[in-house]
Image: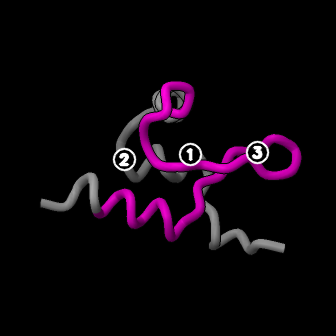
Amino acid sequence: MPTSDEYLTRAQVAHRLKLSAKTLANWKSIGKGPRCVRLAGGRVRYPSEEYLAWERTEFDP
């Protein structure tokens, strides 16, 4: 069973990027932004290591 520190919620990612959760949902629908997965119950989560790697490649100079 994955632990909570292995995944970020949409709200956590939105906060880090200073975007709304709705923007992230829209990005997902068009294939943009960090990869996310659906967990049991339909919850959307972002694998933390993958998200952090994406953030570094997208936002580091």
* Contact between labelled residues 2 and 1, with CB atoms less than 8 Å apart: no
Residue at image position (53%, 49%) is 35
- Tag 2, which secondary structure? helix
Quadrant in the picture for the N terminus:
bottom right
Earlier sequence position, callout 1 versus callout 3: 1
| Left or right: 42, with 60 as reference point | right
Q: Amino acid at mark 1?
A: Ala
Residue 17 tag number: 2
Residue 44 on the magenta span? yes
Q: How many marks?
A: 3
| Left or right: 20, with 9 as reference point | left
Residue at image position (39%, 36%) is 19
Residue 31 picture location, percent across and down: 49, 33
Separation of residues labelled 3 and 2 (CA atoms): 20 Å
Q: Is residue 13 above or below residue 51?
A: above
Q: Is residue 22 above or below residue 17?
A: above
Separation of residues labelled 1 and 2 (CA atoms): 10 Å
Q: Residues within 10 Å of mark 3 (few under 14, many from 20)?
A: few
Quadrant in the picture for the C terminus:
bottom left
Q: Residues within 10 Å of mark 1 (few under 14, many from 20)?
A: some
Residue at image position (59%, 55%) is 46
Residue 11 tag number: 1
Q: Which residues are magenta?
A: 28-56
Pointer 3 residue: 43
Earlier sequence position, callout 3 versus callout 2: 2
Q: Is residue 45 above or below residue 5?
A: above
Q: Amino acid at mark 2?
A: Leu
